[in-house]
Image (tube, rainbow, N blue to C red):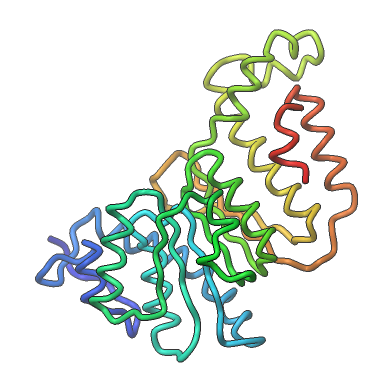
């Protein structure tokens, strides 16, 4: 075991133990130390957004999609909402056993303003178990098209902020691969994705570009950066969108040009609406 690093003031040690970040005797091993550092790093980006929303109204609502074990939701509640009298966190997860565990842990810790729903991201868009308006939507490593469903959810709920850390993204790459021969005859730029590994990487890159253009076309200001030190994949892109209700000029036109130029027209319904 290594020495325990500085833990944020007010952080529940019981929570960290239940999330297996701390051992039962309050220690950290190398893996859990890294996990805690990663969650705190992401919290560093989200806390200012929470503060900004709270200035307008304290009864903030946050939905975390693809919640998994709900590390992010629990940490956000513990560090930000626990000491306040208002605010609510919803965790959306398809695995029943993880939903049950999160529900039990919230009850054990008396985190009364947390709910965990056994829904897909797509199902949650129209679920009556969620409010009509949501302030902040997060999706941390929601696999493949689940991230796009989270974006659609956020747009439907008129979220003020959207925080995305995209995960595996296979859909665009698979379509690029399907139309590869056609692309070779259309543009020499197809050399960028001629080899399978380049198809996968370029497809992932294009997917996030399309997501950013979609958000900008709906009146969001988008910031893209990298989460340093995350080891979930080779690249951890952090996309933060702020609703300003002023669509970026020509964003949708540029999006459609990319779909056409890369033979991705069959994805139109996913990225143009």
Above or below, comparing residue 187 to residue 220 in the picture: above
Above or below, comparing residue 186 to residue 141 in the picture: above
- The residue nearer to you, when weighing 240 against 106, is 106
Instruction: Name the residue at the front extreme.
Output: 128
Q: How far across and how far down the image is residue 146, in percent?
A: 53, 45
Residue depicted at x 53% and y 51%: 123
- The residue nearer to you, when weighing 229 against 158, is 158
Residue depicted at x 20% and y 68%: 17
Q: How far across and how far down the image is residue 6, in percent?
A: 29, 75
Left or right: where 246 falls relative to 123: right
Left or right: where 52 falls relative to 114: right
The image quadrant where one finds the N terminus is bottom left
- The residue nearer to you, when weighing 108 against 257, is 108
Left or right: where 44 falls relative to 126: left
Residue depicted at x 78% and y 68%: 244
Q: How far across and how far down the image is residue 171, in percent?
A: 58, 30
Q: Quadrant of residue 102?
A: bottom left
Above or below, comparing residue 259 to residue 146 in the picture: above
């Amino acid at each position: 075991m290594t020495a325990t690093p500085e833990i944020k003031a007010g952080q529940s040690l019981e929570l960290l133990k239940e999330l297996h970040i701390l051992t039962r005797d309050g220690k950290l091993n190398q893996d859990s130390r890294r996990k805690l550092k990663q969650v705190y790093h992401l919290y560093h980006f989200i806390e200012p957004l929470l503060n900004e929303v709270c200035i307008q109204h304290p009864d903030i609502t946050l939905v975390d999609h693809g919640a998994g074990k709900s590390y992010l939701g629990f940490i956000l509640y513990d560090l930000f909402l626990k000491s306040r009298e208002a605010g609510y966190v919803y965790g959306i997860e398809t695995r029943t056993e993880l939903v049950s565990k999160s529900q039990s842990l919230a009850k054990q810790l008396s985190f009364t303003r947390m709910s965990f729903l056994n829904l897909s991201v797509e199902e949650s868009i129209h679920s009556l178990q969620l409010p009509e308006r949501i302030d902040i939507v997060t999706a941390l490593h929601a696999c493949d098209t689940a991230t796009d469903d989270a974006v659609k959810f956020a747009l439907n709920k008129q979220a003020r902020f959207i925080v995305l850390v995209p995960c595996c993204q296979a859909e665009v790459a698979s379509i690029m691969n399907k139309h590869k021969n056609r692309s070779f005859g259309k543009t020499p730029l197809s050399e960028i994705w001629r080899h399978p590994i380049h198809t996968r990487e370029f497809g992932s890159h294009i997917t996030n570009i399309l997501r950013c253009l979609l958000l900008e076309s709906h009146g969001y200001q988008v910031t893209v950066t990298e989460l340093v030190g995350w080891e979930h994949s080779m690249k951890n892109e952090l996309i933060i969108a702020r609703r300003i209700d002023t669509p970026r000029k020509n964003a949708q036109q540029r999006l459609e040009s990319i779909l056409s130029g890369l033979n991705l027209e069959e994805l139109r319904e996913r990225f143009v609406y």
